[in-house]
Structure formats: structure tokens, C-alpha cells
Amino acid sequence: MTKGSPVFSYQLYSSRNFPPMSKTFEMVSKAGYAAVEGYGALYADDAAVAATQAGLAATGLVMPTGHFGLGQLETEVDKVLGIAKALKMERLFCPYVMPDDRPKDAAGWKAFGARLEKAGAPYTAAGFGFGWHNHDFEFKALADGSLPQDRIFEGGPGLEWEMDVAWVIRGGADPLAWIDRCRDRITAAHVKDIAPAGGNMDEDGWSDVGHGTVDWKTIMAALRKIGVKHFVMEHDNPKDDARFASRSIASAKAF
């Protein structure tokens, strides 16, 4: 992986409860970000894609990475390719699988990894990076003692990884150990922080980056060392998205 200057991005999902999105683009730009990360609602139809294009054009922001659901990735290949090209994305990540759809054992997770890699084939063939974005459930041990995250990568050896560090920690795993083990997979990282135990319960226990318990100085240095370029700020439920955006990028730039 080639080393380079980090790109600080903002996952627009963080502002889903603070419409309109046109104002969010302006807020993010003024906060000092160069990039944003997309999610499904921003390209749900042609009008949404046009609005997202307009927001990018008006602020000079770019959208190098985007999240797409597995069903759409598998069944609407031409549409996804069109969206990714229209928004000038570089990498596509599948972000989640619903609880009822999650495999129950190691073989199932390995097969899921193979399914992901197959789903990503048309996109990698078109020149896009493609991979998985984790939550915490991938780090909960299965009956045989193995972890879903390992089985996913076993089944999908070519998958990239957008590592959501805080979810790794909430899953009970050591992010530094995973960074070392998966140094050739990690092409992007979600930068989010965890409040002290019992804190920020009205924000689901999350914190602005640099104001929580995650050792981001050490972790970001490790990620930069292996060549990660895209650092995406995210907060799942901020009370004030502008506060989160500004404080988080200030912290990230200081690490």
C-alpha cells in the first residue's frame, strides 16, 4: 500500500437527523473537511444523486468512498456503477448485514465472505476498490472459538477492509493487533470515539473524536504507517452534528 497524506472525510450518515443535506455539505466544508462518505439515502434515486452532486459541486468536497447495501450491490450492478462514477468514488464498501441475515457458524461466515467477494467482482473489474465495513458482531466468538471477521476474510481473500475502530473495540478486540494482522486489507478507517462508561448515554455512548476513551493518537499513527489514506469521521447519534464535525477534525489533525 502506498503511503500518502491522509484525507479527512465525514460520514454523512452522522448528519441524517439534521436536514437538509445541502446545509450539511456547507457545514462540513466550513469545518475543514476535504471529503465526505456517502450512504444509501444520498443516492436512493436520480433526484438524490443529483442533489448530492450539487452539494459536492457547491462546496468543492469530494466523495471518494461510499456505502452500499449488499442486496443492491448484487442486484443493481449497473445502477451502482453509474452512481459511483457520477459521484467520482474510488472505493465502495458494504456496511452491514441485518441480525436475521447473519450466519450462525464459521462455515456460514466463510460463505458470506465469498458472497461479498463475488458481489464485488463487477466493481473491482471496473476499477473500484471494494470491501467490508465492520461493526461489533464480527468480533464475537462463534461456537468453534473463531471470529466472524476472520471467516469473512477467509472466504473473501481479496476483500478490502474499512476498519471501524471503535466498533472493533466495542466488540472486545484489540484494534492495534488487527491493524498489524490486516495491514494489506485496510484501505479506509472510520474514526469515532467512545465515551467513558456511563457517559453520553443520550448519544448512545459515543463521543466526539479526541474527547473519549479511544487512543486515537496511537491508532492513527499505526493506520498511517500501513498506508491508510481515508480517515472518515463518524458519530452514530450526535446531539449536535456541527459540534461533532468541528471538534473531531481538530483532534484528528493534531494526532
Image (tube, helix red, strand yellow):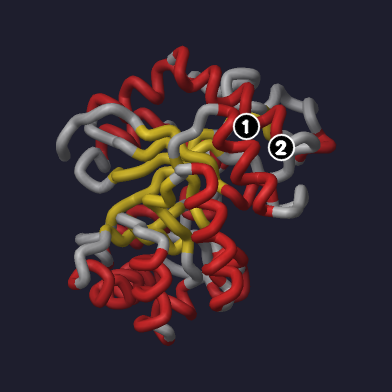
Compared with residue 191, is residue 62 higher up or lower down, i.e. above or below?
A: below
- Counting labels gives 2
The residue lying furthest to the right in this view is 202
Give the label on residue 235, or none: none
Q: In which quarter of the image is residue 108?
A: bottom left
State which quarter of the image contains the C terminus: top left
- Residue at 30 percent across and 71 percent down: it is 120
- Identify the disc placed on residue 245: 1
Q: Do the residues labelled 2 and 1 touch (CB within 8 Å)?
A: yes
Residue topped by disc 2: 241
| Farthest-out residue, front | 58
Quadrant location of the N terminus? top left
Q: What element does badge 1 sit on?
A: helix
Note whether 79 is above or below 63 in the view shown. below
Residue at (44, 36) in percent of width and height: 34
Residue lying at the far bottom in this picture: please name it. 75
- Residue 12 image offset from top left, x and y in percent: 59, 49
At label 2, counting other C-alpha atoms closer than 10 Å, the crowd grade (few under 14, some 14-19, many 20 or more) is many
Which SS class for mark 2?
A: helix
How far across and down, in percent of the image, does residue 100 sit? Answer: 61, 74
Which is nearer the eye, 194 or 232?
232
Image position of 50 (left or right of 145): right
Q: Residue at x 66, y 52 (%)?
A: 22
The answer to whether residue 142 is visible is yes
Residue 179's place in the image compared with 147, above or below, is above
Looking at numbered disc 1 in the image, what kind of residue is underneath it? Ala
Dot 2 amino acid type: Asp
77 left or right of 2?
Answer: right
